[in-house]
Image: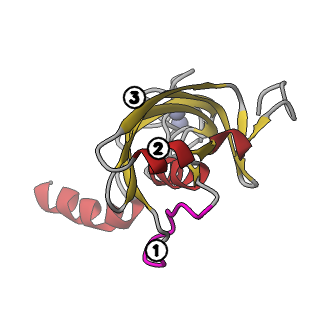
Amino acid sequence: MKSTSGNYVTNRVLKLNVGFLLADGPGNSHEMAFNLPAIRLSDDLILGYIKGVLRLSRTKEGILVQGQLAVELDDECCRCLEAVSAEITFDLEELFMHPPSFETEFSIHDDGILDLAPLIRSETLIIQSRGIYCRPDCKGLCAECGENLNHTTCSCEADDIDPRMAPLKQLLDSMNS
Ligand SMILES: [Zn+2]
Ligand SMILES: [Zn+2]
């Protein structure tokens, strides 16, 4: 986490009042630019920023949210375990139902509030579950000694054969000799 610990805007800024767009009727749309500083998206997720542009379109079923967002996520590299602040981007395309539907978690109730936080949270967690890397070519940790191979080379043998395969290798070696 950054030294700005505790200095976050709340996820209330992602509760958009779209009553005007609901009233405009199908076919109307509205573009919104986001450039938010560090934000507490939910109890379990803080983002360094949220940037991007979304188009909100009134349809017969509700409001369609489309666009691309970039968010900054503090995590650890899934390969070398170093702390990393990674920018991740994702495309959004989600229909927020109005009147609300029980078939989706994305609904707009009579207060006209469209809450983007749960949608951004779920997209962020999907990407996080695939693994965040400190850099695309992270070399990771040595399986033998645990050294971070981005910073140093170790003297372990490059011949990193899977231990479960070792008996097979011995057998092959003995057959070849
Ligand atoms: Zn790494
Ligand atoms: Zn090593």
> Which residue is identified by label 2?
21
| Secondary structure mainly formed by the magenta segment | loop
| Amino acid type for the residue under numbered disc 3 | Pro
- Marks 3 and 2 close (CB-CB < 8 Å): no
Which of the marked residues, 2 or 1, is nearer the chain's N terminus?
Answer: 2
> Which residue is identified by label 3?
136
Question: Could you tell me how far apart the alpha carbons at marks 3 and 1 are, in whole angstroms?
Answer: 41 Å
Which of the marked residues, 3 or 1, is nearer the chain's N terminus?
Answer: 1
Question: Could you tell me how far apart the alpha carbons at marks 2 and 1 are, in whole angstroms?
Answer: 19 Å
Which one is in front in this view, the residue at disc 3 or the one at disc 2? 2
Instruction: Return the x and y of residue 72 as percentages of the image width and height.
Output: 58, 31
Instruction: Return the x and y of residue 146 as percentages of the image width and height.
Output: 59, 41
Which one is in front in this view, the residue at disc 3 or the one at disc 1? 1
Residue plotted at (18% across, 61% down): 172
Instruction: Return the x and y of residue 157 as percentages of the image width and height.
Output: 42, 37
- Marks 2 and 1 close (CB-CB < 8 Å): no
Label 3 SS: loop
Q: Is residue 1 left or right of residue 26?
A: right
Residue plotted at (32% across, 50% down): 26
* Disc 3 within 8 angstroms of ligand 1 (CB): no
Residue 151 makes an appearance in the image: yes
Q: Which residues are magenta?
A: 101-110
User: In the image shown, does 149 or 33 lie closer to the viewer?
Assistant: 33
Tally of numbered discs: 3
* Rendered image quadrant of residue 35: top right
Q: Residues within 10 Å of mark 3 (few under 14, many from 20)?
A: few
> Which residue is identified by label 1?
101
* Disc 2 within 8 angstroms of ligand 1 (CB): no
